[in-house]
């Protein structure tokens, strides 16, 4: 007989008793099962903290990005907090196409044709030729951003900026 103990939802414990064939799994009271049986062969504890990563905090973005007009960028991110995980993911993806530790500037841009519409831009600062830079940006778009952009809900865009 094999017994397992698992941590579920970070709070509740449940033990599963299995016979040698692995059939007839039945939940049992974990506390009484552990105290009653000294021959427990396996105790398996699942730490949900390691399974589910904590959501990144907006302040962590300042370690990745440079902010142009920081108060405006921070306010925009605070108002659109759903962007934070996407911004972390975007920085990693940008690094895959433009080299590790890329210089990326976040800026809130107002559409000149619609004064009320603002969007957060990530400008990848590069010194590549325009052809190479646009080729890499196009590859990033096709291989990741076109699928991921729905998460941005039209509030985030990625572009290059020549330095």
Image: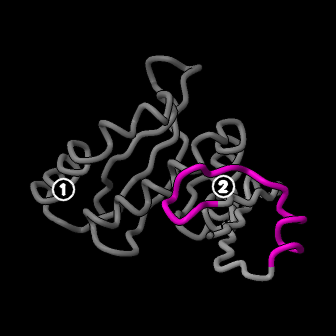
**Where is 7 relative to 151, above or below?**
below
Which color scheme did the rendering employ for the protein?
one colour
Q: Residue at x 44, y 60 (%)?
A: 91
State the CA–CA distance, disc 1 to disc 2: 29 Å
Q: Is residue 143 left or right of residue 28?
A: left
Q: Residue at x 38, y 40 (%)?
A: 148
Q: Secondary structure at mark 2?
A: loop
Task: Check residue 23 for magenta coloring.
Answer: yes
Name the residue furthest left: 131
**Where is 36 relative to 142, above or below?**
below
Q: Is residue 51 left or right of residue 59?
A: left
Q: Which quadrant is the C terminus positioned in? A: bottom left
| Residue segment shown in magenta | 18-37
Q: Position of residue 11 (x, y in %)?
A: 83, 56
Q: Which residue is mark 1?
A: 136
Q: Residue at x 48, y 35 (%)?
A: 151
Q: Which residue is mark 2?
A: 55
Given residues 135 and 142, the one toward you in this image is 142
Q: Which quadrant is the N terminus positioned in? A: bottom right
Given residues 9 and 143, the one toward you in this image is 9
Between discs 1 and 2, the one toward the N terminus: 2
- Residue 86 is labelled as none
Q: Position of residue 61 (x, y in %)?
A: 60, 61
Task: Check residue 117 for magenta coloring.
Answer: no
Q: Position of residue 82 (x, y in %)?
A: 62, 40
Q: Secondary structure at mark 1?
A: helix
Q: Residue at x 34, y 60 (%)?
A: 94
Q: Is residue 5 left or right of residue 29?
A: left
């Amino acid at each position: 007989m094999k017994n397992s103990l698992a941590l579920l939802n970070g709070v509740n414990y449940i033990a599963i008793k299995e016979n040698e064939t692995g059939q007839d799994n039945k939940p049992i009271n974990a506390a009484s099962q552990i105290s009653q049986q000294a021959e427990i062969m396996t105790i398996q504890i699942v730490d949900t903290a390691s399974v589910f990563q904590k959501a990144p905090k907006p302040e962590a973005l300042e370690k990745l990005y440079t902010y142009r007009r920081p108060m405006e960028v921070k306010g925009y991110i605070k108002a659109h907090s759903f962007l934070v995980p996407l911004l972390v993911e975007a920085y990693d993806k940008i690094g895959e196409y433009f080299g590790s530790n890329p210089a990326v500037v976040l800026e809130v841009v107002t559409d000149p044709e619609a004064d009320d519409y603002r969007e957060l831009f990530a400008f990848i600062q590069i010194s590549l030729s325009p052809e190479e830079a646009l080729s890499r940006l196009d590859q990033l778009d096709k291989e990741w951003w076109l699928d991921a952009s729905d998460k941005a809900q039209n509030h985030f865009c990625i572009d290059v900026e020549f330095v």
